[in-house]
Amino acid sequence: MPWKTRTILGVLAATAVTGCETLPPPPPDVVLVQTGEQIFFNETFSGNGRTCGTCHRAEDNFALSPAFIATLGPDDALFVSETNPDLANNFENARLIREFAMILENQDGFDDLANNFNMRGVPHTLALRTSIESAAGPQTGWSGDGSPGDGSLRSFAVGAVIQHFPQTTNRVAGVDFRLPTDAELDALEAFQLSLGRQEELPLPLPLKGIVAARGQEIFIDRAQGKCNACHFNAGANGDPAIFGPTAGNLNFNTGVEDLPDQPADLSGELVPPDDGLGTPGVGEFNTPVLVESADTGPFFHNNSVETIEGAVAFYNGDAFNNSPAGALLIGATGSGINLDATQVVAVAAFLRVINALENIRESDSLLESAYPDYRLTDTQRANLIRRAGFEIEDARQVLTGAGLHPIAAAHLEEAQTLVERAQASSGGQAKRLVNDAAAELERARVRMVD
Amino acid sequence: MKRTATVFLGTLFLIIGNTALPQQATEVYIPIGQSPGVSGRDSIIGSISTVDHERYRMMISVAGETKMVTMTPATRYYLDKTRARKQNKTSSFEDCKVGQRIEAYVDDDGNAVWVKIEAPD
């Protein structure tokens, strides 16, 4: 029976029984996303207790930072190598998790667990719909080869379960974990694709802040920042005018591995060089989205740079300008990237402002989704409002971290307060508070962009 | 400025040629018939009927039919011990024996990207 017919009959039946109107159930695509969300945060796949949400935290932009890790209790599944003797060796480095949010990956194979591994940060899972397609196929994970099987986002969870969820490092399917079913993979893919931005930004934006607006100009300028060539529209795809209309997401060796004084290296712990794409690797990593960057640090695959200003400044340094990607850029344009401090800060301000605008868009969308024209459980509604609160707080922090748009930040603070009150309320009162929060979000937004 | 931009465009075009790769490492722990998006679509599952060690190819019997699969230097080999509840291992062409259950993931040219052979109990 078609869904619409079923829904109408369901509504009629419910009305007949109760004598009053009731909302229909959610449409199938929403149910699939809801199912995926439940699996993402709760399903351990009979493994060591971790879920996808253990590392991709909703509270931390579906990523993981040292500051957030510091708030976790000792029995959190993230620290399973400290609590499960079978995973005490060669599964994680507890110090590097706690200090630098770095997770162990056996990207080049499992034959020499003690020596052959990479330490990588946790990439967020926002805006995946805009960032993983390429002419050569899907690019997942830090180096584009994060997914087994056909390499698709749908298949990604299978590799993640094998790498991060096993009860022992024997990794025997059916013993140390169970593999996700096809239905679970479908739902997980739908949920991940639903997260964050669904479309590219249309740059240039009519920004009101003079520093951010200047940063946008530098970002786009092919003679100055040159950023837009590989991060087209501050996304993860190559500029179609340069790389072709279907190039999509591209891999480069930008020299991040050659950065001196990387925090993890300074720790004295064993951190083997990461060879990126392939087995053995070719030193390339895929281009990340930038719209969501300012609130998802630390930056780069090895969490080597803590601030967005530092990440922009990376492209001024020897590591980038001597890298294959840097050499390509110099060969193509006659010079590397050479921005002064004010210009670095301006580009970072631009990235902070577009991140805050995206936080506002996403939080507004989540608040609107909390009161749809179909039925939601109280828990589902509470989760949506809770996630909106995280986004609003991020927007405020991203702006205040660089002294940007203080009046917008004040509106965001008010919106945050209203959302917290909505979380503590119910029924019509909660809905009114959510509407008031949305109005504050709009007041913040119009302070930043026309 | 216009010239610079033109050169910029032309040169950067040259780097397109990246190939998206599935992750190779965790494939070893995925049992025969369960590789996501591959098993049942782009793979052959059957039993080895002949092995030609000189020409690096083998015949696989699948439901009464026989299919030839050619190995390349890039082909990866996995020994599947899941049914015995033991740890899977990487393997080699020399481990492929007549009668073994096998899954071969083949490309459009009939070359094996990887093969998984079931370990004897």
Image (cartoon, rainbow, N blue to C red):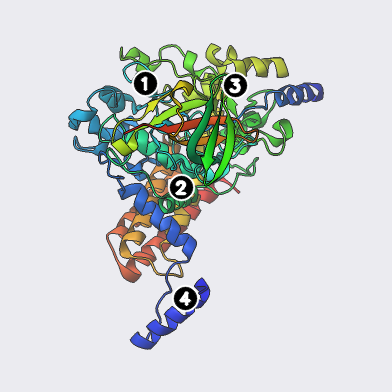
**Is B66 or A289 nearer to us in this picture?**
B66
Q: Amino acid at mark 3?
A: Arg
Mark 3 belongs to chain: B
Badge 4 amino acid: Thr
Q: Report, in whole angstroms, how far the alpha carbon at label 3 lies from the one at label 2.
A: 45 Å
Mark 1 touching mark 2, by CB under 8 A? no
A74 or A427: nearer the viewer = A74
Q: Earlier in the sequence, mark 4 or mark 2?
A: 4
Residue at x-position 60% and y-position 33%: A231
- Numbered disc in front, either 1 or 2: 1
Q: What amino acid does circle 1 point to?
A: Asp
Q: Secondary structure at mark 4?
A: helix
Above or below for B53 versus A217: above
- Between disc 3 and disc 4, the foreground one is 3
**Numbered badge on residue A7:** 4
Question: Which image quadrant is residue A271 in?
Answer: top left
At 43% from the left and 49% from the top, the residue drawn is: A185
The Cα atoms of the two marked residues, 1 and 3, are separated by: 28 Å
Residue annotated with mark 1: A111
Q: Position of residue A136 (x, y in %)?
A: 63, 34
Label ID, residue A351:
none
| Three-letter code for the amino acid on which mark 2 is drawn | Gln
* Badge 2 element: helix
Quadrant of res A64: top left
Give the CA distance from mark 1 to mark 2.
31 Å
Q: Residues within 10 Å of mark 4 (few under 14, many from 20)?
A: some
Residue A425 point in image, percent of width and height? 28, 63
Q: Residue tagged by mark 2?
A: A192
Q: Does residue A12 lie above or below A397 as drawn?
A: below
Q: Residues within 10 Å of mark 2 (few under 14, many from 20)?
A: many
Q: Which residue is mark 3?
A: B55
